[in-house]
Image (cartoon, rainbow, N blue to C red):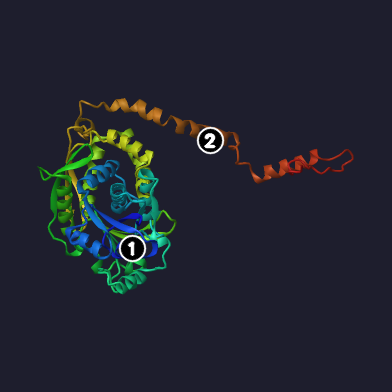
Amino acid sequence: MAEKVVLAYSGGLDTSIIIPWLKEEHGLEVHAVCGDVGQGPEELKGLEEKARRTGAKSCRIVDQRREFLVDYVWPNLRAMSVYEGRYLLGTSMARPILAKAQVEYAREVGARYVAHGCTGKGNDQVRFELTYMALAPDLEIIAPWRTWKIRSREDAIDYAEARKIPISASRTKIYSRDRNLWHISHEGGALEDPANPPPDDVWVLTTDPRRAPDTPEIVTLGYERGVPVSLDGKALAPEALVAKLNAIGGRHGVGRVDIVENRLVGMKSRGVYETPGGTIVLEGLRTLRSLTLDRDTFRACEKLMPEYADLVYTGRWFAPAREAFDAFFARATEVVTGEVQVRLFKGCATAIAAHSRFSLYSESLATFGASAAFDHADSQGFVKLYGLPGMVAASVRRSAATRGTKPAGAQSASAKAAGAKAARGKGARPGGKRTAVLAGRGRS
């Protein structure tokens, strides 16, 4: 009886050819699993039948949309994690939950192996395999792109055509795409040269900002404890809220990013991303957080965010450090509750107004007008003490300059020459003959 393997299956070019390859090269019984994280009905339609026709013993689609947003995207929102200043981590967040479903299905069918279609150049191989290692270290991993003779997407297309496997990729439009509720990413083809502007046929979710409506649109987002819960006063389920924001933001050309990023494996790669809803959510959240967090907590969040984003980007979702960071950000954002108005116009999302019952802003304190809550005279002592270290340092430097001395390290060239001459004199023997000074030459 053949050993079993569970393949993380999308129905795309790579995973479509992996099913027959696993059977031909390893003699395995292949079971496919696909996590539905919002890639769209067009990608899932007929997927189970396609997997069976290409040789899979079974194929299961697991609805993970709510879990993906609540347990993976929302924690990233509390941290406001952004990789290298621009990437909103859409693919990075999705890989661990997909690998988790794969492990669960492997347990169910009694598989010995798990397999994925990630290339040896990319980050996804790490994200999948670190999840396997954390959740099921006993399962053996098969990564075809690291062992087979196929070396390019063109080779993969040839392999599929030879076996009459239906695929959507072509030789003239070779983009590698990954889509979920949060975003869609595009790589490959003309995008491999950073000197090429993204072709118009790359974009899927967003209108060209130049062709977006000439009238701005304002949306009102409601947040509770650092995550969105309502749109324009109406409470919505997470997946419905994000889907609606994607449609609205996409119409206004919001959320396009073209970035050359540093991959975990050491090379730079170009990624083009569309995250319209997520861009709107983060813009509102950024303003609400500045309104409700005290200075020390705000700065602690800012310092820890890059570390959190790096954990997510590099596939360490199930690491203890990520769980510890989650506890911090959940506690820090307990007061990040309120509503924010965000204006959408020609590719831009701009927060324009916010209010919260936890707001730390006090008009009576901050006003330029008369205020009974603030006495300007109180600032005199504060400013004096705050400037005390600088004042002392300046005083010392002025005194030294007056006496004609200089701080250590500022010795003049003439003084150095005189010191050197004196040192040579100390090394002379009686009668004027000098001795060689060997100290400090490192002999042993």
Residue 367 figure quarter? top left
Q: Which mark is residue 18?
A: 1
Residue 163 at x, y percent in the picture: 30, 72
Residue occupying image coordinates x 35% and y 51%: 128
Quarter of the image with the C terminus is top right
Residue at the farthest right position: 431
Q: Residues within 10 Å of mark 1 (few under 14, many from 20)?
A: many
Seen in the picture, residue 435 relative to 146 is either above or below; the reply is above
Query: Among all residues in the image, which is located at the extreme left?
Result: 234
Q: Position of residue 265 (x, y in %)?
A: 43, 55
Nearer the viewer's eye, disc 1 or disc 2? 1
Residue 384 percent across, percent down from the top left: 39, 28
Q: Give residue 191's mark.
A: none
Which three-letter amino acid code belongs to the residue tagged 2? Arg
Residue at the disc numbered 2:
397
Residue ID at (34%, 56%): 1
Where residue 369 sits in the image (x, y, percent)?
20, 33
Please report the residue visible at 19 percent of the width from the left and 64 percent of the height from the top: 210
Q: Residues within 10 Å of mark 2 (few under 14, many from 20)?
A: few
- The secondary structure type at the circle numbered 1 is helix
Nearest the eye: 63 or 247:
63
Toward which corner of the image does residue 177 lie, by quadrant?
bottom left
The answer to whether residue 43 is visible is no
Q: Amino acid at mark 1?
A: Ile
Structural distance between the alpha carbons of marks 1 and 2: 72 Å
